[in-house]
Image (cartoon, rainbow, N blue to C red):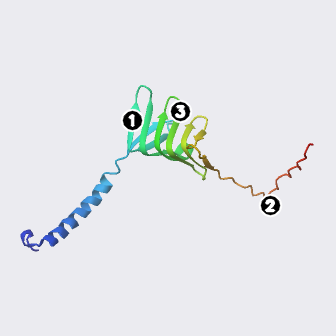
Amino acid sequence: MMPCYKLSISQMRRVGLALMLPVALLGTFAFPNQLQTATAQTSKENRPLTIRADVQEYNAKTQVITARGNVQMSYPARQLQATAAQAQYFSKERRIDFSGNVYILQQGGNSIRAERVTYLIDEGRFVALPQPNTQVESIYMVQESDNNAQTATPAPKTPQFKRSN
C-alpha cells in the first residue's frame, strides 16, 4: 500500500469518503431521529399512548403534554394513529386536542381529516372542526352483510311526495 503522503488529493478524498460512509451509516442506526417521544398511560390496564414530535413540553401542575411539529400519535389499545401540527394530551380529562392538518386513521380504514379534532378517550368520540370555508372529511368503511351469498335486501321505497295546495 502506498503511504498517505504519496497519494494524490483525489485519491485521498476517495479514501476519506470510503471511511466516512460506514461511520455515517452507523450513526444513522445508532442515533435514531431527534424526535422526542412521550408515552402516557391512558387506561387502567396501562396500555400506552405514544406521541412523537419535534418538541414536547409537560406541565406537572396541570398534567398536560403539549407536542409541536410533525406530531405522530399511536394508540394501539384503540387502534388509532394520528398526525397533526400540534397535539395536547390532557391526562386528567382523558382528552386529546389535535390541531393543524389533522389526520386520524383507525384500523379498518375509518379516517378523519380536519383542522382541529378533539378525541374524548373514555367516550371513544371525535369532535372535528374544519378550516374556515371548508368541511371536515370522514371516511367510514361499511361492511356489507353476506347473507349466505344472497343478494342484499333492497332499501325500502320512498313514498311519493304529495303537494298540498
54 to the left or right of 81: left
Residue 110: image location, x then y, percent: 61, 50
Decide which of tag 3 and tag 1 comes sooner along the chain: 1
Q: Which corner quadrant holds the N terminus?
A: bottom left
Task: Assess whether mark 2 and mark 1 are in contact (beta carbons under 8 angstroms).
Answer: no
Question: Which residue was labeled with disc 1?
Answer: 57
Q: Specify the amino acid type for callout 2.
A: Thr
* Picture layout, residue 153 above or below residue 18: above
Q: CA distance from mark 3 to mark 1?
A: 17 Å
Few, some or many C-alpha atoms within 10 Å of disc 1 (few <14, some 14-19, many ≥20)? few
Label for residue 151? 2
The three-letter code of the residue at mark 3 reads Arg
Asked whether 131 or 145 is in front, the reply is: 131
Mark 2 burial class by Cα count in 10 Å: few <14, some 14-19, many 20+: few
Instruction: Report the number of numbered marks.
Output: 3
| Viewer-nearest residue: 79 or 52 | 52
Give whichever of discs 1 and 2 has the lower sequence position. 1
Local secondary structure at mark 1? strand
Regarding mark 2 in the picture, which secondary structure is present there? loop
Label drawn at residue 98: none
In the image, residue 95 lies at what x, y percent? Answer: 53, 34
The part of the image, by quadrant, that contains residue 55 is: top left
* Residue 112 coordinates in the image, percent (x, y): 58, 47
Question: Amino acid type of disc 1?
Answer: Glu
Could you tell me if residue 95 is visible in this image?
A: yes
Q: Quadrant of the C terminus?
A: top right
Identify the residue at image location x=27%, y=59%. Answer: 24
Identify the residue under disc 3. 94
